[in-house]
Amino acid sequence: MVALQGTFPSPNGGGVDNTFIGEVKLFAGNFAPTGFAFARGQLLPLIQNTALFSILGTTYGGDGRTTFALPDLRGRTPVGAGGSVNLGQRLP
């Protein structure tokens, strides 16, 4: 799931209890809680999700004018970001 609502992330940190916009969380339910969407690569309207778009941009798809996409994590495991793999890069 990807957080659609929450605190805008800052390089200066934040509280450990905050949910950050764009944060990916694991959830075992068959529904997305309020403020979250499943990470299934779906397109979202930019006008309704401007804060999230400012973080994700068109990294995962969309035209960048009216839509952008969430990451598609179906069948994948999120492992975090690091210097050896670029954001959005797919590994074999």
Image (cartoon, rainbow, N blue to C red):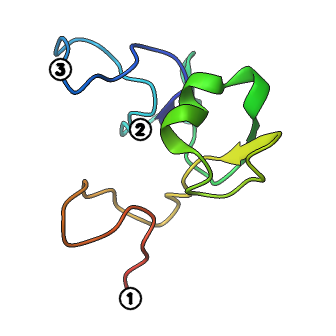
Name the amino acid, label 3.
Answer: Gly
* Residues packed near mark 1 inside 10 Å, few (<14), some (14 to 19) or many (20 plus): few
Of the residues tagged 2 and 3, which is closer to the observer?
3
Q: Amino acid at mark 2?
A: Ala
Q: Which comes sooner in the sequence, label 2 or label 3? A: 3
Q: For this view, does 84 lie left or right of residue 73?
A: left
In the rendered image, the vertical position of residue 54 relative to residue 85, given as above or below = above
Q: Are marks 1 and 3 in contact (CB under 8 Å)?
A: no
Q: Which residue is mark 2?
A: 28
Q: Nearer the viewer, residue 68 or 64?
A: 64
For residue 92, the mark is 1
**Residue of label 3:** 13
User: Which sits earlier in the primary sequence, circle 1 or circle 2?
Assistant: 2
Residue type at mark 1?
A: Pro
* Secondary structure at numbered mark 2: loop
Q: Which sits earlier in the primary sequence, circle 1 or circle 3? A: 3
Quadrant for the C terminus, please: bottom left
Residue in the foreground of this view, choosing between 33 and 54: 54
Disc 3 is placed on an element classified as: loop
